[in-house]
């Protein structure tokens, strides 16, 4: 299935977006239940066991990233080498961190606003500092001032709370921006039909194909799931690879508990190292609440101008004269006119806006 050509939420601009609350109003309903194949639920214990956490030297960072390249060969190695994540630190600022990391990866830092007379982008070194984004996090995510209905636990609420603030206001105006809800709100009992209707008896497969279809064409996706937000940049046979937000110079292994459709509990590793994390993808797809990404429109191909054969005039040694239907020039073109050349007319911006209909 081509997720980009599909006439569904996957191909719409986010300006008039479907909300998570809209999913259960649509028909047919695709219910999430214990009978859903591969439906692994996440235990409320979440990251209940930290195995280890170590600081990494620069040499160790390079070694870890080289290992990631070998484990995920389809991911752009330049992205792995150059990734410089926003470190959310001990705060639960993953929604802001994932949004900022996504914008930086896809080259959309202009959405944070332009500064100076030259209207230049803010530098990534400025944007990733906690003093820059901490107030935004407290406002649109934590709702510390009570300006919104509730805190943001997914991108749906984040985009609502931040609708008039940078960078969200510019993201929503960007025609290449996409927001896609996957699970309904509340108890999260239903799947977005636009995502799973291609496989009504196996909705998790529909989610997997949509996510991996975007990754196949090198589109990173910010997802919210299980109380955490990350940017997916690749996958292999068994795992997803995330551009994460816990710093470049750390390695950490967490054990989380998942419950399969039969109620059996399993312990799953969530391995973070050198700015990236990876995890068994079977336990991620059933629990994605929503996601957002950018799809740039294809550049129209302009056909080259037709080739014309221009032959030089045999009577001209210094210039080439295009052939025409006029009589052949016999006089030498040495003498130059002494008349003042006509000045090129100048036009006001209003003229161009009228002619080009901006």
Image: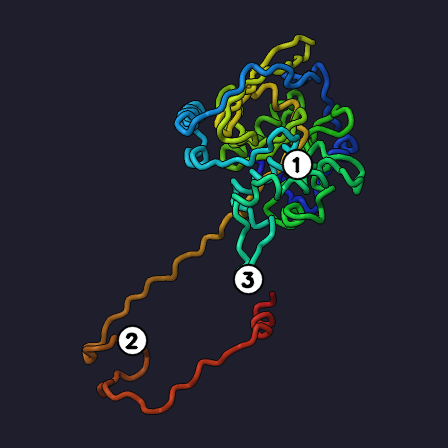
Lower position in the chain sequence, tag 2 or tag 1: 1
- Residue at far bottom of view: 338
Q: Which mark is residue 323?
A: 2
Percent x, y of residue 343? 43, 83
Quadrant containing the N terminus in the rendered view = top right
User: What SS does tag 2 mark?
Assistant: loop
Pointer 1: what residue? 180
Quadrant containing the C terminus in the rendered view = bottom right
Percent x, y of residue 223? 62, 32
Q: CA distance from mark 3 to mark 2?
A: 50 Å
User: What SS does tag 3 mark?
Assistant: loop
The reply to whether residue 5 is visible in this rendering is no
Using the image as rendered, state which of residue 205 and residue 342 is in the foreground. Answer: 342
Which label lies toward us, 3 or 2?
A: 3
Q: CA distance from mark 2 to mark 1?
A: 60 Å
Which label lies toward us, 2 or 1?
A: 1
Which label lies toward us, 3 or 1?
A: 3
What is the number of callouts on the image?
3
Task: Please say if 143 is above or below 61.
Answer: below
- Tell me the crowding category of disc 2: few under 14, some 14 to 19, or many 20 or more residues within 10 angstroms, Cα based: few
Q: CA distance from mark 3 to mark 1?
A: 37 Å
Which quadrant of the structure image shows residue 144? top right
x 73%, y 23%: residue: 31
In the picture provided, is 146 more to the left or to the right than 133? right
The reply to whether residue 249 is visible in this rendering is yes
In the picture provided, is 159 more to the left or to the right than 207? right
Pointer 3: what residue? 117
- Tell me the crowding category of disc 3: few under 14, some 14 to 19, or many 20 or more residues within 10 angstroms, Cα based: few
Using the image as rendered, state which of residue 243 and residue 274 is in the foreground. Answer: 274
Lower position in the chain sequence, tag 3 or tag 2: 3
x 56%, y 71%: residue: 352
User: What SS does tag 1 mark?
Assistant: strand
């Amino acid at each position: 299935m081509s997720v980009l050509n599909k006439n569904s939420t996957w191909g719409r601009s986010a300006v008039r977006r479907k909300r998570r609350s809209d999913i259960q109003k649509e028909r047919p309903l695709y219910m999430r239940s214990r009978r859903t194949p591969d439906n692994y639920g996440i235990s409320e214990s979440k990251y209940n066991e930290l195995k280890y956490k170590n600081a990494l030297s620069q040499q160790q960072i390079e070694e870890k990233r080289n290992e990631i390249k070998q484990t995920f060969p389809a991911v752009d190695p330049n992205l792995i080498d150059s990734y410089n994540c926003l470190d959310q630190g001990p705060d639960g600022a993953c929604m802001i961190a994932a949004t900022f990391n996504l914008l930086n990866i896809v080259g959309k830092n202009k959405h944070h606003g332009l500064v100076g007379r030259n209207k230049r982008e803010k530098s990534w070194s400025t944007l990733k500092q906690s003093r820059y984004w901490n107030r935004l996090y407290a406002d649109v995510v934590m709702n510390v001032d009570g300006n919104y209905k509730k805190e943001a636990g997914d991108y749906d609420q984040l985009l609502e709370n931040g609708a008039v603030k940078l960078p969200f206001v510019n993201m929503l105006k960007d025609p290449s921006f996409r927001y896609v809800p996957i699970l309904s709100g509340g108890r999260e009992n239903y799947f977005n039909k636009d995502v799973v209707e291609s496989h009504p008896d196996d909705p998790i497969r529909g989610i997997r194909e949509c996510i991996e279809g975007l990754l196949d064409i090198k589109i990173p996706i910010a997802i919210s799931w299980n109380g955490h937000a990350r940017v997916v940049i690749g996958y292999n046979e068994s795992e997803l690879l995330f551009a994460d937000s816990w710093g470049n110079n750390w390695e950490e292994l967490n054990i989380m508990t998942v419950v399969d459709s039969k109620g059996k509990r399993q312990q799953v590793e969530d391995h973070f190292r050198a700015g990236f994390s990876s995890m068994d993808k079977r336990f991620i797809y059933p629990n994605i609440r929503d996601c957002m990404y950018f799809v740039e429109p294809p550049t129209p191909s302009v056909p080259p101008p037709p080739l014309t054969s221009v032959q030089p005039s045999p009577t001209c040694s210094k210039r080439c004269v295009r052939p025409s239907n006029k009589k052949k020039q016999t006089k030498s073109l040495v003498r130059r006119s002494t008349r003042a050349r006509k000045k090129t007319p100048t036009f006001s911006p209003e003229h161009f806006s009228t002619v080009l209909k901006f």
